[in-house]
Structure formats: C-alpha cells, structure tokens
Image (spheres, rainbow, N blue to C red):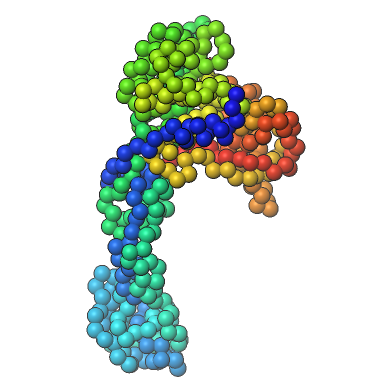
Amino acid sequence: MIPVNEAINIVLQHSPKLEVESVALGDALGRVLAEDIVADSDLPPFDRAQMDGYAVRAADVANAPARLRIIGESAAGAGWHQEMKAGETVRIMTGAPVPAGADAVQQVELTREIDGGSQVEILEPVEAGRSIVRRAAEIKAGETVLRASEDINAAMIATPASFGYAQVRVGRRPRVAVMATGSELVNVDKKPGADQIRDSNNYTIAAYASLAGAIVERWPLAGDDTEELKKQIKQAAETSDVLITSGGVSMGVYDFMKTALKELGAEIFFERVALRPGKPTVFARLGNTLVFGLPGNPVSVAVTFNLFARTALRAMQGAKVPGLIEETAVLARAVKGSVDRESYLPAILRTDEKGTLLAEPLKWGGSSDFVAFARATALVNVPAGVGFLEADSIVKIVRMPNCH
Ligand code: AMP
Ligand code: MG
C-alpha cells in the first residue's frame, strides 16, 4: 500500500504531455492553453469615454453652469477627429474616442442642451480626467495577458478574443476508453435478471472524464473472465491514450483485472493505495496507453477517478495545476478516520451566517451508496492514523468537479 500523495506523484511521472493543436476560439472552453496570449494592441486602443455625455475642457466648466458650443459628435466606432478648442464641446457616447483638446467627460445627466442643440449647458464642474480611460491604461501592446498551461474558462475567453486569437493553441484532448467489468452487469436499457445489476460506473467515469477534457469512447461491458478481459483491454488500449476500467481489482476469486494486465505484459506502477474508499486502485501502462483499474464500488470510482485519472488527463493536456485544489473548511459533524488509510469522504459544502465554509460529510452506507453520493460537492480528507475528527475541526477538502 502506498500513500495517496505518492500515488499521485507516480501518476504525474508517467503522464506524458500530448501534442499541441489549434482550435477555433469558440471551441476552446475547457481546454488547456498551450501558448501565451500576448496583447497585439493597447487597451483601450485610444482615450475612451466611460459615459454618455459631453467631452469638455475641465477649465471651461470650473464655474458651472457654463455654456459650450457643440461642434461635433463622437460615437463608438465613429469618432470626431479634430482638435476641440476652448469654449467648445463634442457630444460623446460610451466607448467612443475622446477628441484631442478635451480632458474630461461630463455625464449627460448633468447637462442640458439649448438653442436647438447647438449649445449645451454643463450644470456641474468636472475634474480633469473624469470618465476617460486613457489609452493603454489597462494593457500595453506586447504584454503577456494569459500564460500557457492555464485552463480556458468563460471568464478568460474575452482576452484571446480581444487580442485577435481566432485560433488558440491548446493541448490535445486525451482519448479515453471506458470499460466496466463484472459478470453481474447489464446495460442501462436492460432489466437486471436474478443476481444482476445495471452498470453505472461507465456513466460516472465518462461524465468525469469529459469534465476533465477527454474524448470518451465506451466499450462493451466485460465479464469476469481473464481471456475476455485480455482481448478487450488489448483492443481498447490500441485506440486510446488512457484506458479506465472499473471492477475486478479486489481480492475476490473472480477479480481478474490485474491478472489480465500482467499476462498482457503491462507494467504495473501501483495496485494498492492507502485510501478510503478506493484501496485496490491499479495504475499501469500497456504499450503507450495508461491504464487505471478503478475499484467496482460506485463511490470508490468517483473518488479514485478524480484523485488519479483526472490528474493524468489534465497533466497530459499540459495543465499547470492538474490535481484537485486543496482548500480548508470546518467540519460540520464528527467523522471517523482509519488507522492505516487516508480517507476522502463525500461531503456537502455550505457556508454559515458568519461566512465560514462548512463541510458536512454525507450520511452514507459506504462506498456502494451512489444515491447518497449524488449530493456530494466535495471530499473531506482525514489523514491516515486519525481515528476520529470532532465537529468544528479544521479539515482539508477538495471540491468535486460537477458541471461544465
Ligand atoms: P468488484 O470490485 O468487481 O468486486 O465490485 C465491487 C462492487 O461494485 C460489487 O458490488 C459490484 O457489483 C459493484 N460494481 C462493479 N462494477 C459496477 C458497475 N459498473 N456499476 C455499478 N456497480 C458496479
Ligand atoms: Mg467485479
């Protein structure tokens, strides 16, 4: 048995970065940047009005109310490009360039047009600089604004868009083969017979793998038979970067996954992790394909996928932070740990009225209880050797990826 962090390090050591590809910016959400994004222009590219109103010389309106002659109009996309002189003003819209000679914008609410629109009365003074964003005040041309290895999220998509990146370089999406094993399994559209259950792990793994950026291919359910497993593992490995199986890795008489991998000549990097749930997790390589043999229990699948397989998938795409991010929270009720294993217990996160982040471990029936797990938004970490954690203890948590 190896500790969780050691297992994660082994996963990282064996997760090669995939090639880089170009995608249209509109398809880049959720991908990992493989190039720095550099500003190709100043931002704003010109002195920009921040308000609808009148471009003025602050000195002209120091003793407001003051009358100014309207000599033009500067709209977004159609500026007024002459020199504005003393006593003059230009009607200006938000986003429009501020004319040379003006040093402030007075907002329209503090003005009144007179003489049929040929003059305006500025009702209050305005200090120089007001409601103008100076050219390059935000970004200077040539500045690096996003770095390779960052995750492209919705908040950052405006940045490459504004600097002309119609295409962006990103890490290739890993191809993941998903394969549930177990002679008791039937597909979701079948009524389970005596002694059978429906497969859910393929759906869980496919869901989390696609959240991690992978392209998922689902393989037929495999029975507990070494030859059948070997055949299907071999085929799946030939067309995937990562094969993720579930079931068949514990100590039962019919747990043939490790035997199948070994007989195929796979290199096994670890096969038991000091983790609860998820002890019998296997990590191996067959040819160039990484293999994660996850346990069969549905909650163990969710936990081990996100600790290990997700980390590999994101590292392969070049992510700077491939693993789940650790945070701290206050435990909402007491939980039991384990003497020899680190626990990652499903929990719900919420905040109390003081703003404290609380982690409430689910009341669950163990690692097979996928119905309780459906509410989980995080995992609470209990270090190995800590038998019991009282309510109000400060704990380490990781959030579970849940939605695009
Ligand atoms: P195993 O590790 O193969 O012994 O499986 C452990 C438990 O998980 C057993 O109760 C299995 O029936 C259950 N299980 C295994 N595979 C799946 C699956 N694909 N979907 C739902 N439950 C499963
Ligand atoms: Mg099984």
Image coords of residue 290 (percent x, y): 41, 26
Relative to 265, residue 357 above or below = below
Image-quadrant location for residue 189 = top left
Foreground residue among 355 and 168: 168
Image coords of residue 168 (percent x, y): 30, 49
Residue at point 32%, 86% (across, down): 101
Relative to 393, residue 268 above or below = above
Is residue 94 in view from this perspective?
Answer: no
Image coords of residue 3 (percent x, y): 60, 30
Residue at point 56%, 33% (across, down): 6
Numbered circles on residues, count: 0
Relative to 345, residue 264 above or below = above
Q: Is residue 140 rendered to the left or right of residue 207?
A: left
Quadrant of image for the C terminus: top left
Is residue 390 in view from this perspective?
Answer: yes
Relative to 99, residue 143 above or below = above
Image-quadrant location for residue 31 = top left
Q: Is residue 403 rendered to the left or right of residue 370?
A: left
Q: Is residue 93 rendered to the left or right of residue 200?
A: left
Foreground residue among 257 and 223: 257
Quadrant of image for the N terminus: top right
Residue at point 29%, 87% (across, down): 84
Image coords of residue 393 (percent x, y): 72, 42
Residue at point 72%, 33% (across, down): 386
